[in-house]
Amino acid sequence: MSLLKQEAGLTWQALKNPLAGPLLLGAALWSYVAWAGQGGPVLASLLVAFILLLQSLVDLKHGLLTHSLNALLALSGLVLAPLYLGLPLPEALLGPLVFFAVFAAMAWLAGRLAGRPALGGGDLWLVAALGCWLGAGGLPPFLLALAILGLALVAWRRAFPKKGRKAQFPFGPVLAAAGWLTLLHQTLYWKCIISLTV
């Protein structure tokens, strides 16, 4: 079976997940509010939410992130982020390089300290694809969102331990959620930073 056919099968399974519809509806409402009903940005952020939701559901069930969905996220970002979100094309081109380099360095360092791999290859390609949507300037708010969500997940797992639960967990959904929240709210982040420095 070819890789593309296998990934299509995993994506189809994710689409049939009963959580997919309600989560996508919630994302649509949040996108609409965040972009004040502007058609292009709402649809663009909804496309991102759809791809990230599929990736998250595949990762939760199978422990992997598909190359085809990462490629779709990256290519759509290079086209739609400059067209509808006002991200300059050089930023959209630089974003994946910056995101990949920073996360590859962090994964290498964490792997050296922990003695085992910290991030999978699919995780690195996912953050690189998010860089096409967020640009290099999206890295600081993305790291903040990732830290908050990661800490919340660890706190939840400690507060509600489950017998037989693995210590490791798929990190793709956390990366996806952080990326989508950054897409919607990175302007607010920079406004707060500027107001604190003035």
Image: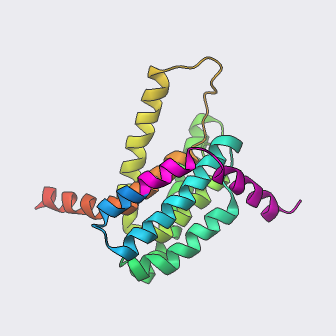
Q: Residue at x 51, y 80 (%)?
A: 79
* Viewer-nearest residue: 43 or 162: 43
Q: Where is residue 161 in the image (x, y as percent from the top left)?
A: 53, 19
Q: Where is residue 38 in the image (x, y as percent from the top left)?
A: 32, 73
- Whether residue 188 is visible, yes or no, is yes
Q: Position of residue 41 (x, y in %)?
A: 38, 72
Q: In this view, does 38 lie to the left or right of 108?
A: left
Q: Which residue is drawn at 40% across and 52% down?
A: 143
Q: Residue at x 46, y 34 (%)?
A: 153
Q: Where is residue 93 in the image (x, y as percent from the top left)?
A: 50, 77
Q: Which residue lies furthest to the right in this view?
A: 1
Task: Characterize the magenta stretch by its predominant secondary structure.
Answer: helix
* Viewer-nearest residue: 46 or 167: 46
Looking at the rendered structure, the number of numbered marks drawn on it comes to 0
Q: Is residue 172 magenta?
A: no
Quarter residue 25 falls in: bottom left
The magenta stretch is 1-27
Q: In this view, does 193 lie above or below 158?
A: below
Q: Is residue 69 above or below residue 111?
A: below
Quarter residue 117 falls in: top right
* Viewer-nearest residue: 105 or 165: 165
Quadrant location of the C terminus in the rendered image? bottom left
Q: Does the magenta stretch include residue 8?
A: yes
Quarter residue 27 falls in: bottom left
Q: Residue furthest left?
A: 198
Q: Which residue is drawn at 44% across and 70% down?
A: 43
- Whether residue 175 is visible, yes or no, is no
Q: In this view, does 91 lie to the left or right of 126?
A: left
Q: In this view, does 138 lie to the left or right of 94?
A: left
* Color style of the picture: rainbow
